[in-house]
Image (cartoon, helix red, strand yellow):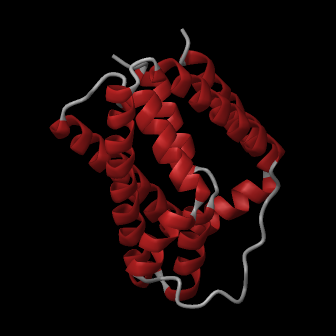
């Protein structure tokens, strides 16, 4: 059984912290309105679902071929989470690009997941660290794929709906917010070995 607190912390921080998906969602809602930005969010959901399913299959194949890979993947996952904590701590408020066009489509949200290193590494890390070591059946992997994709959908919708409030708060208090998020990520990395 995985450490549920670490799993939940990692999922919430990864999905709700500023990143390409959330910033574009917020930008779309401010330019086109909430309803017209929803298709992008559905595209993010679809892309994350596909990525998690692919990562699940890849991780299962690795575990079946090389059973000792679990500890190696845990170290890699912890290293990435610590790197993410450092980047989160050091990050400053981002300014949005003014010349983005037609970013509110389902296809934009879907394709972004396959070129967004954050999404790819998030899926690989989550599946290989928190899911596959404990669950191996296709139905359970499908449930986790849906759960992780749904978390991404909720996050992008929240950023769309409350984007201006989050943006103002993050810009005003970015040092405190970044420190709290970074410390929670460090907790996630350390808890992998407890």
Q: Quadrant of residue 110?
A: bottom left
Looking at the image, which is closer to me, 164 or 1?
1
Query: Residue shown at 78%/71% (left/top)?
Result: 95
Q: Position of residue 17 (x, y in %)?
A: 61, 50
Q: On the image, which quarter does residue 90 sit in?
A: top right
Instruction: Report the front residue among 10 and 176.
Output: 10
Instruction: Classify the position of the C terminus by image quarter.
Output: top right
Q: Residue at x 49, y 64 (%)?
A: 113
Q: Please provide percent x and percent y for residue 19.
A: 63, 58
**Looking at the image, residue 88 lies above or below residue 93:** above
- In this view, 126 is above or below 171: above
User: Where 57 falls versus 50 (above or below)?
Assistant: above
**Residue with the most extreme top position:** 194
| Relative side of 99 to 8, left or right | right
* Residue 173 place in picture, x, y as percent: 78, 49
As drawn, is 183 to the left or to the right of 106? right
Q: Position of residue 133 (x, y in %)?
A: 37, 23
Name the residue rendered at 51%, 38% in the picture.
125
> Does 6 appear above or below 56?
above
> In which quadrant of the rendered image does the N terminus lie?
top left
**Residue 175 as seen in the image, left or right of residue 162:** right
Residue at left offset 54%, top offset 79% = 28
């Amino acid at each position: 059984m995985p450490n549920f607190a670490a799993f939940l912390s990692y999922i919430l921080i990864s999905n709700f912290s500023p990143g390409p998906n959330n910033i574009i969602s917020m930008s779309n809602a401010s330019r086109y309105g909430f309803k017209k930005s929803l298709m992008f969010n559905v595209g993010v959901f679809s892309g994350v679902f596909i990525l998690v399913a692919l990562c699940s299959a890849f991780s299962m194949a690795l575990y079946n071929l090389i059973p000792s890979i679990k500890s190696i993947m845990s170290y890699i996952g912890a290293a990435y989470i610590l790197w993410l904590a450092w980047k989160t701590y050091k990050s400053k408020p981002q300014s949005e690009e003014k010349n983005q066009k037609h970013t509110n489509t389902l296809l934009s949200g879907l394709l972004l997941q396959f070129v967004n290193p954050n999404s790819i590494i998030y899926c690989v890390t989550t599946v290989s660290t928190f899911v596959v070591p404990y669950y191996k059946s296709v139905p359970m992997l499908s449930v986790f794929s849906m759960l992780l994709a749904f978390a991404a959908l909720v996050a992008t919708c929240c950023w769309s709906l409350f984007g201006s409030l989050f943006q103002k708060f993050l810009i005003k208090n970015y040092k405190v917010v970044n420190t709290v998020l970074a410390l929670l990520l460090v907790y996630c990395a350390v808890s992998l070995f407890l």
